[in-house]
Amino acid sequence: MESTRKALLLIPVVAILLGLGAILAPISNDHVNESVTLTVEKSIIEKPTITGYVTLQVFDKDGILKQTVENHNLIVDVGFDEMAEAIFGVGGVGTTLFDYIEIGTSSTAPSAGQTALVSPIGGCARVQDISPDVNTSISGETSVSVISSFSGVTCAGGIQEAGIFNSLAGGQMLGRSIFGIVTIGSSDTLNLNYTVTLT
């Protein structure tokens, strides 16, 4: 009799546990499915990154290094537009290379809507690198270095900004960087390395 009573008491307990299992199983599966969906969506929306880095070195008339400054840059909207046009061959100038560097004296912060330097140095022309250095040694990453030299004869001053362009004059700006004052004397030479990396 006692064993029968215990068996009868266990029936509701077992029923409750089975019911909870039936309720929780779909919730658990939904959670797993949701995690898988989020992971797939995350991998789909990840997009390439384009960054720029500028290195400036000032040498005196004897070739002795006087100053080195480095800083990141901002890729501007028109730069992104021109890259898209170059990839798909539509609109704009399409395949014009970004291989000109210009320097200026403004410390105004870079912003996405800028299309030119704020205060380029008068008489100091953009300098072209006719053979930019391409580095693809890291799988899935490409960096291109555009290197230009500026003479203090025409470009002396306190340099605080640099930009990379696709034309000797006018054209489009890919990116702009500002940095601490780099002083170029009339007998100095400024070497500027503008590296753009795509990952």
Image (cartoon, rainbow, N blue to C red):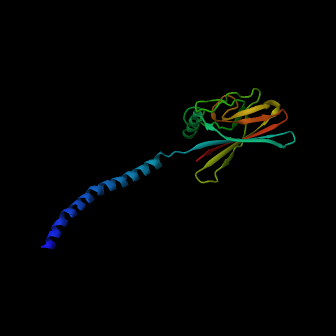
State the residue in front, 32 or 187: 32
Q: Position of residue 17 (x, y in %)?
A: 24, 61
Q: Residue furthest left?
A: 1
Q: Residue furthest right?
A: 62
Quarter of the image holding residue 92?
top right
Q: Residue furthest top?
A: 122
Q: Position of residue 140 (x, y in %)?
A: 58, 51
Asked whether residue 55 appears in the rendered view, the answer is: no
Taking 198 as reference, is 32 above or below it?
below
Q: Position of residue 71 (x, y in %)?
A: 68, 41
Q: Residue at x 23, y 58 (%)?
A: 19
Taking 89 as reference, is 9 above or below it?
below
Q: Position of residue 185 (x, y in %)?
A: 82, 33
Q: Residue at x 66, y 45 (%)?
A: 144
Taking 56 as reference, is 171 above or below it?
above
State the residue in front, 2 or 95: 2
Quadrant of the snapshot with the N terminus: bottom left
Quarter of the image holding residue 119?
top right
Asked whether residue 41 appears in the rendered view, the answer is: yes
Quarter of the image holding residue 20?
bottom left
Q: Residue at x 74, y 28 (%)?
A: 121
Total marks in image? 0
Q: Residue at x 84, y 43 (%)?
A: 64
Left or right of 182 in this view: 1: left
Left or right of 1 in this view: 134: right
Left or right of 199 in this view: 132: right
